[in-house]
Amino acid sequence: MLEYQIGDSMRNDEDRTVGHVSNSSVRNRDVTGHLDYVIAFTTCAETEAERIARTLVENKTCACVNIIKGVTSIYYWEDRVQSDSECILMIKTVSSLTGRVYQIIREHHSYQVPEFVVLSIVDGARDYLAWIDATCRQT
């Protein structure tokens, strides 16, 4: 059973009474209290962004990937400061699939060391998070 926190009150899926607290956004946690929904980020060249995003979605490792174009990255690599134009891929998924997401990124990415950072979603609209859950758990 999925439990979630609304404001300062813990609720579960069977508890539909929220009293004075709006149920339009929730802090989602699984039954162990761990955050379940995440956003993973990677950067890549524009020429490979759509291919990586489409592969992730088609494999149902995520519900959605936003491609943010026109990002300039400045970073230290091979003993010098470098700069490149890149895209950020913002990948909405569940924590149990982040290993598979990273595997697909590694398989389809041109970088030797692709960025891969995962952040917990601590709050969100219930229907949106339910959509992420339903999409990702079809595998």
Image (cartoon, rainbow, N blue to C red):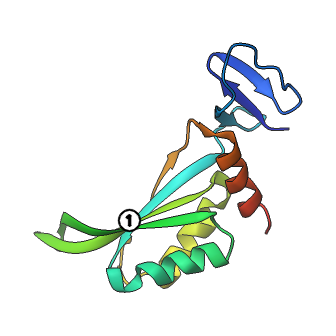
- Please name the residue shown 69% across and 71% down the image: 60
The residue located at (56%, 73%) in the rendering is: 103
- Classify 10 Å Cα crowding around label 1: few (below 14), some (14-19), many (20 and above): some
As drawn, 45 above or below 16: below
Q: Is residue 137 left or right of residue 25?
A: right
Q: Is residue 78 left or right of residue 31?
A: left
Residue at the extreme right: 14
The amino acid sitting under disc 1 is: Glu
Q: Quadrant of residue 13?
A: top right
Figure quadrant of the C terminus: bottom right
When asked about the image quadrant of residue 126, the answer is top right
Q: Is residue 75 left or right of residue 98?
A: left
**From the viewer's perspective, is 9 left or right of 51?**
right
What percent of the width, then of the height, locates residue 58?
65, 78
Q: Residue under label 1, please give it.
A: 115
Q: Regarding mark 1 in the picture, which secondary structure is present there?
A: loop
Q: Nearer the viewer, residue 2 or 17?
A: 17
Residue at 69%, 36% in the rendered image? 29
Task: Depth check: give the residue in front, 30 or 67.
Answer: 67
Report which quarter residue 120 is drawn in.
top right
Please tell me whether residue 89 is drawn above or below residue 110 in the rendered image.
above
Q: Position of residue 70 (x, y in %)?
A: 25, 70
Front residue (pair 139, 24): 24
- Residue at figure coordinates x 35%, y 79% from the top left: 111
Picture quarter with the N terminus: top right
